[in-house]
Image: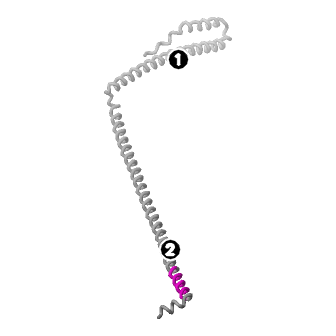
Amino acid sequence: MPLKSSGRNGNHHTSLEAKTNGHGDEDSSNSDCDSSLYDEVESERRKVDCLDDMQFLEQQFSDLKELLFHEKVREIDERMKHISEEGAHEYLQPLKELEEARQRRTQTAELQCSCKLQNIQNKYDEEVASAEQNFQELIQVTKRKMVATIQEKIRRLHEEKIVAELTKENGSRKRKRNSEFLLPDKRKNQSQ
């Protein structure tokens, strides 16, 4: 956009010149004062011109900014429409790569899960086998203890039986002897 000329301050400029002309009727001793007044008026005029130019540039900047904003919004809308129609190649390739990465990760996770489940199953089977083996060993130890206890009881009973038989035999011999001592006639009769 072309810049406007700075000729819009003409009314203000002429009013400043009128002020300086009103003071120009005084004598030459006031010429120094006139030049400083002229410098002030000139600097005021330049300040106003600069402010007007700055305001004009700000307006142009604001207009350009608004125009660029609308252009960018339109461009984004077109891109969104293009993407929604699945024709944006700059997005389709990364999308395809992401899908492949997702599939690989899913397969890896499934394989890892399967391996973990198999590992858990193996540990479970191992613990069951170990418990079964411990149980069977405990049964064998208990059987051996019971057999040993029963054999010990049988041995003691056998010993007691022998002792009882010996005691019975001993007792019958003693009775026999005692009866022989008591009946000497019978012994004599038997020898004849």
Residue denoted by label 1: 54
Q: Is disc 2 surrounded by few (<14), some (14 to 19) or many (20+) residues within 10 Å?
A: few
| Disc number for residue 129 | none
Q: Residue at x 47, y 67 (%)?
A: 145
Secondary structure of residue under mark 1: helix
- Amino acid type indicated by mark 1: Met
Residue 128: give x, y in percent of width and height.
42, 54
Residue 98: give x, y in percent of width and height.
36, 36
- Amino acid type indicated by mark 2: Arg
Q: Which residues are magenta?
A: 168-180
Toward the viewer: 60 or 95? 95
Toward the viewer: 58 or 79? 79
> Is residue 41 shown above or below 76?
above
Q: Quadrant of residue 45?
A: top right
Q: Residue at x 48, y 19 (%)?
A: 61
C-alpha distance separating marks 2 and 1: 128 Å
Residue denoted by label 2: 156
Instruction: Decide if residue 22 is on the left or right side of residue 191.
Output: right
Secondary structure of residue under mark 2: helix
